[in-house]
């Protein structure tokens, strides 16, 4: 019930007067026929420095987020495992694939998933650079590397277009530090979900008590009325 994506998908940054927009809570997945499968994100975890970042240089290592959905969907929609060990040297030259829902030339989406494959050209710190063709709207997609033996695993998240360096597109590689951060976020979101569930349970119990008290008040009023009639 947790989804890894780019922070800019749920709290977009605009490198101008307006630096952020409200967090988005509606999440949809597109089916092959173009219809949508809708869920709601009850909460989200972002890097603590995300809201204060004002430039590309500040956000380029922070653009990750985890969404906590209102129900588990992995069994129904499928999921991809995170690569627990990121090897920089081994990934250079590998085929990297991801998919997203890009905007067309008119700035609207056609509702269809688009897949893009290319090669990892270089790795700088926790960032991957690749020559995949990307379009605005594909940010937040899982970067999949296939070794030809095991099922593809997510090694990163697509976060930016080719304006950054050498006209290559790029994303954040899921290094050990990021794995630890993501696990911490998931634990925090699970704790929040548990607290909310407990809060809802208490509200339901209080509502039940209020209903019982109202029923007792009603019976007491009827009893007093009957006593007055007898007198």
Image (spheres, rainbow, N blue to C red):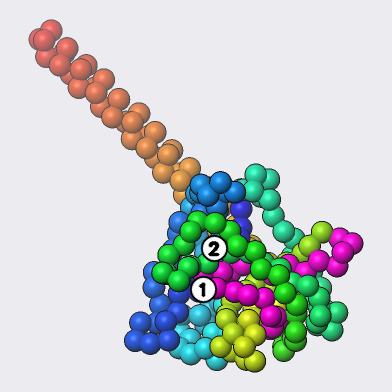
Secondary structure of the residue carrying tag 1 is loop
Judge whether 168 appears above or below 149 on screen. below
Residue 69 screen position, x and y as percent: 55, 54
Residue 136 screen position, x and y as percent: 51, 73
Quarter occupied by residue 68: bottom right
* Separation of residues labelled 2 and 1 (CA atoms): 9 Å
Label number found at residue 101: 2
Which residue is found at the position 68% from the left and 50% from the top?
Answer: 78
Judge whether 214 appears above or below 130 on screen. above
Which of the two residues, 227 or 60, is positioned nearer the viewer here?
60
Name which of mark 2 and mark 1 comes first in the sequence.
Answer: 2
Which of the two residues, 37 or 168, is positioned nearer the viewer here?
168
Secondary structure of the residue carrying tag 2 is loop
Whether residue 105 is in magenta: the answer is no
Residue 151 screen position, x and y as percent: 82, 59
Residue 160 screen position, x and y as percent: 57, 80
**Label 2 Cα crowd, 10 Å radius (few <14 / some 14-19 / many 20+):** many
Boundaries of the magenta span: 127-150
Residue 164 seen from this side: yes
| Residue indicated by mark 1 | 136
| The furthest residue to the right | 149
Whether residue 140 is in magenta: the answer is yes
């Amino acid at each position: 019930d947790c989804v890894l994506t780019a922070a800019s998908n749920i709290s977009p940054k605009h490198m101008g007067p307006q630096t952020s927009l409200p967090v988005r809570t509606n999440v949809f997945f597109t089916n092959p026929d173009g219809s949508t499968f809708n869920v709601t994100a009850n909460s989200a975890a972002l890097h603590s420095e995300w809201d204060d970042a004002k430039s590309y240089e500040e956000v380029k290592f922070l653009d990750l987020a985890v969404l906590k959905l209102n129900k588990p969907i992995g069994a129904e929609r499928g999921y991809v495992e995170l690569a627990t060990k990121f090897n920089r040297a081994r990934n250079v030259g590998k085929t990297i694939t991801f998919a997203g829902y890009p905007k067309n030339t008119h700035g609207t989406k056609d509702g269809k998933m688009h897949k893009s494959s290319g090669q990892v050209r270089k790795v700088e710190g926790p960032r991957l650079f690749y020559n995949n063709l990307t379009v605005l709207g594909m940010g937040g997609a899982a970067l999949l590397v296939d070794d030809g033996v095991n099922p593809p695993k997510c090694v990163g998240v697509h976060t930016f277009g080719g304006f950054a360096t050498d006209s290559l597109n790029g994303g954040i590689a899921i290094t050990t530090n990021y794995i630890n951060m993501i696990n911490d976020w998931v634990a925090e979101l699970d704790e929040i979900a548990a607290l909310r569930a407990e809060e809802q349970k208490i509200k339901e119990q209080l509502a039940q008590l209020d209903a019982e008290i109202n029923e007792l008040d009603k019976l007491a009023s009827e009893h007093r009325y009957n006593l007055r009639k007898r007198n």
